[in-house]
Image (tube, rainbow, N blue to C red):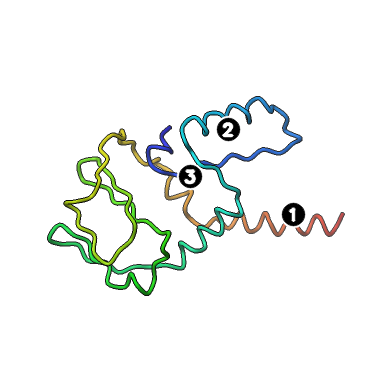
Amino acid sequence: EQKLQRNDPLFFYHHPTHRNWDVVEFLFKEMKMKGIANTTFLEYARWWKTRQQHTFEMSIGNDCIELPTRSQNADSEMSLHIIHVNSGEAIVPISERIDLSTLPWDFSKKQTSVPADVRRIREFDPRTVLGGWYRKFMRKMA
Protein backbone atom coordinates (compact mmCIF):
# COMPACT_ATOMS: atom_id res chain seq x y z
CA GLU A 1 0.00 0.00 0.00
CA GLN A 2 2.85 2.39 0.82
CA LYS A 3 4.48 1.76 -2.56
CA LEU A 4 1.16 2.50 -4.27
CA GLN A 5 0.81 5.74 -2.30
CA ARG A 6 4.29 6.82 -3.45
CA ASN A 7 3.67 5.71 -7.06
CA ASP A 8 6.57 3.28 -6.78
CA PRO A 9 6.57 0.30 -9.15
CA LEU A 10 5.54 -3.05 -7.73
CA PHE A 11 7.71 -6.01 -8.72
CA PHE A 12 6.66 -9.60 -8.17
CA TYR A 13 8.91 -12.46 -9.15
CA HIS A 14 7.77 -16.05 -9.18
CA HIS A 15 9.34 -19.14 -10.66
CA PRO A 16 7.24 -22.24 -11.39
CA THR A 17 9.38 -24.33 -9.03
CA HIS A 18 8.43 -22.03 -6.14
CA ARG A 19 4.87 -23.36 -6.25
CA ASN A 20 2.43 -21.49 -3.91
CA TRP A 21 0.20 -20.60 -6.86
CA ASP A 22 -2.49 -19.41 -4.46
CA VAL A 23 -0.23 -16.48 -3.50
CA VAL A 24 0.32 -15.56 -7.16
CA GLU A 25 -3.41 -15.78 -7.82
CA PHE A 26 -4.16 -13.58 -4.79
CA LEU A 27 -1.65 -10.91 -5.92
CA PHE A 28 -3.10 -10.72 -9.43
CA LYS A 29 -6.68 -10.55 -8.12
CA GLU A 30 -5.68 -7.69 -5.79
CA MET A 31 -3.94 -5.84 -8.62
CA LYS A 32 -6.94 -6.27 -10.92
CA MET A 33 -9.34 -5.13 -8.18
CA LYS A 34 -7.26 -1.97 -7.60
CA GLY A 35 -6.95 -1.24 -11.32
CA ILE A 36 -3.18 -1.72 -11.38
CA ALA A 37 -1.88 -2.45 -14.86
CA ASN A 38 0.63 -5.25 -15.20
CA THR A 39 3.62 -5.38 -17.48
CA THR A 40 6.58 -7.61 -18.15
CA PHE A 41 10.14 -6.85 -17.05
CA LEU A 42 11.03 -6.35 -20.72
CA GLU A 43 8.28 -3.75 -21.21
CA TYR A 44 9.33 -1.98 -18.02
CA ALA A 45 13.00 -2.00 -19.09
CA ARG A 46 12.07 -0.46 -22.46
CA TRP A 47 10.01 2.24 -20.73
CA TRP A 48 12.86 2.98 -18.31
CA LYS A 49 15.39 3.21 -21.17
CA THR A 50 13.15 5.70 -22.98
CA ARG A 51 12.70 7.67 -19.75
CA GLN A 52 16.45 7.89 -19.23
CA GLN A 53 16.99 9.31 -22.71
CA HIS A 54 14.95 12.42 -21.92
CA THR A 55 16.19 15.26 -19.77
CA PHE A 56 14.58 18.62 -19.26
CA GLU A 57 15.58 22.03 -18.12
CA MET A 58 12.75 23.83 -16.44
CA SER A 59 12.02 27.07 -14.70
CA ILE A 60 9.37 27.56 -12.05
CA GLY A 61 7.75 30.90 -11.32
CA ASN A 62 4.50 32.85 -11.48
CA ASP A 63 2.50 29.69 -10.75
CA CYS A 64 3.79 27.87 -13.83
CA ILE A 65 6.49 25.46 -14.96
CA GLU A 66 8.20 26.18 -18.24
CA LEU A 67 10.03 23.46 -20.17
CA PRO A 68 11.62 25.26 -23.12
CA THR A 69 13.30 22.12 -24.49
CA ARG A 70 10.10 20.07 -24.49
CA SER A 71 9.76 19.92 -28.29
CA GLN A 72 13.28 18.52 -28.68
CA ASN A 73 13.23 15.94 -25.90
CA ALA A 74 9.78 14.75 -24.92
CA ASP A 75 8.06 11.59 -25.94
CA SER A 76 4.34 12.12 -26.53
CA GLU A 77 3.52 9.44 -23.93
CA MET A 78 5.60 11.00 -21.15
CA SER A 79 4.00 12.65 -18.13
CA LEU A 80 5.20 14.84 -15.33
CA HIS A 81 4.41 13.94 -11.71
CA ILE A 82 4.10 17.15 -9.69
CA ILE A 83 3.85 17.03 -5.91
CA HIS A 84 2.11 19.92 -4.13
CA VAL A 85 3.53 21.27 -0.87
CA ASN A 86 0.16 20.53 0.80
CA SER A 87 0.34 16.77 0.08
CA GLY A 88 -1.41 16.86 -3.26
CA GLU A 89 -0.23 15.60 -6.60
CA ALA A 90 -0.98 15.89 -10.28
CA ILE A 91 0.18 13.79 -13.21
CA VAL A 92 0.03 15.74 -16.46
CA PRO A 93 1.33 15.38 -20.01
CA ILE A 94 4.56 17.25 -20.60
CA SER A 95 4.18 20.53 -22.45
CA GLU A 96 6.25 23.69 -22.84
CA ARG A 97 4.20 25.54 -20.21
CA ILE A 98 2.24 24.02 -17.33
CA ASP A 99 -0.07 26.32 -15.37
CA LEU A 100 -0.02 25.08 -11.77
CA SER A 101 -3.20 26.95 -10.84
CA THR A 102 -5.30 24.91 -13.28
CA LEU A 103 -3.92 21.43 -12.57
CA PRO A 104 -6.27 18.65 -11.46
CA TRP A 105 -4.72 18.33 -7.98
CA ASP A 106 -5.45 15.11 -6.11
CA PHE A 107 -5.28 15.53 -2.33
CA SER A 108 -6.86 12.15 -1.56
CA LYS A 109 -3.70 10.12 -1.13
CA LYS A 110 -2.31 9.66 2.33
CA GLN A 111 1.27 10.89 2.52
CA THR A 112 3.81 8.23 3.33
CA SER A 113 7.39 8.70 4.31
CA VAL A 114 10.18 7.65 2.02
CA PRO A 115 11.92 4.50 3.27
CA ALA A 116 15.12 5.17 5.22
CA ASP A 117 17.08 2.97 2.81
CA VAL A 118 15.76 4.53 -0.41
CA ARG A 119 19.21 5.83 -1.32
CA ARG A 120 20.73 2.37 -0.89
CA ILE A 121 18.26 0.75 -3.28
CA ARG A 122 18.94 3.40 -5.95
CA GLU A 123 22.74 3.30 -5.76
CA PHE A 124 25.05 1.17 -7.86
CA ASP A 125 26.02 -1.98 -5.99
CA PRO A 126 29.28 -3.58 -7.19
CA ARG A 127 28.34 -6.82 -5.41
CA THR A 128 25.62 -7.33 -8.00
CA VAL A 129 28.13 -7.07 -10.86
CA LEU A 130 30.64 -9.31 -9.10
CA GLY A 131 27.91 -11.84 -8.37
CA GLY A 132 26.96 -11.90 -12.06
CA TRP A 133 30.56 -12.49 -13.10
CA TYR A 134 30.91 -15.23 -10.49
CA ARG A 135 27.76 -17.02 -11.72
CA LYS A 136 28.98 -16.87 -15.35
CA PHE A 137 32.37 -18.20 -14.30
CA MET A 138 30.83 -21.07 -12.35
CA ARG A 139 28.58 -22.02 -15.28
CA LYS A 140 31.58 -22.23 -17.58
CA MET A 141 33.42 -24.39 -15.03
CA ALA A 142 30.50 -26.82 -14.71
Which residue position is annotated with label 3?
9
Question: Circle 2 sits on which residue?
Answer: 28
- Rendered-image quadrant of the C terminus: bottom right
Residue 37, horizontal then vertical, whole percent? 51, 42
Residue at the location (37% across, 74% down)?
A: 72
Q: Are marks 1 and 3 in contact (CB under 8 Å)?
A: no
How far apart in space, not on screen, are marks 1 and 2 (Cα)? 32 Å
Callout 1 environment at 10 Å: few (<14), some (14 to 19), or many (20+)? few
Q: Position of residue 137 (x, y in %)?
A: 78, 59
* Mark 2 surroundings within 10 Å by alpha-carbon count, few (fewer than 14), some (14 through 19), many (20 or more): some
Q: Secondary structure at mark 2?
A: helix
Residue located beneath label 1 in the image: 135
On the image, the x and y values in percent for residue 118 come to 42, 46
In primary-sequence order, the first of circles 3 and 2 is: 3
Height in image: 134 above or below 31?
below
| Cα distance between the residues tagged 1 and 3 | 27 Å
Pointer 1 or 3: first along the chain: 3
The reply, left or right, for residue 97 in relation to residue 3 is left
Residue at the far right: name it: 142
Left or right of residue 63: residue 53: right
Closest to the camera, between mark 1 and mark 3, is 3
Which amino acid is tagged 3? Pro
Q: Tell me which residue sits at (55%, 59%) in the image.
A: 46
Give the mark nearest the N terminus, 1 or 2.
2
Q: Dot 3 lies on which element?
A: loop
Q: Are marks 1 and 2 in contact (CB under 8 Å)?
A: no
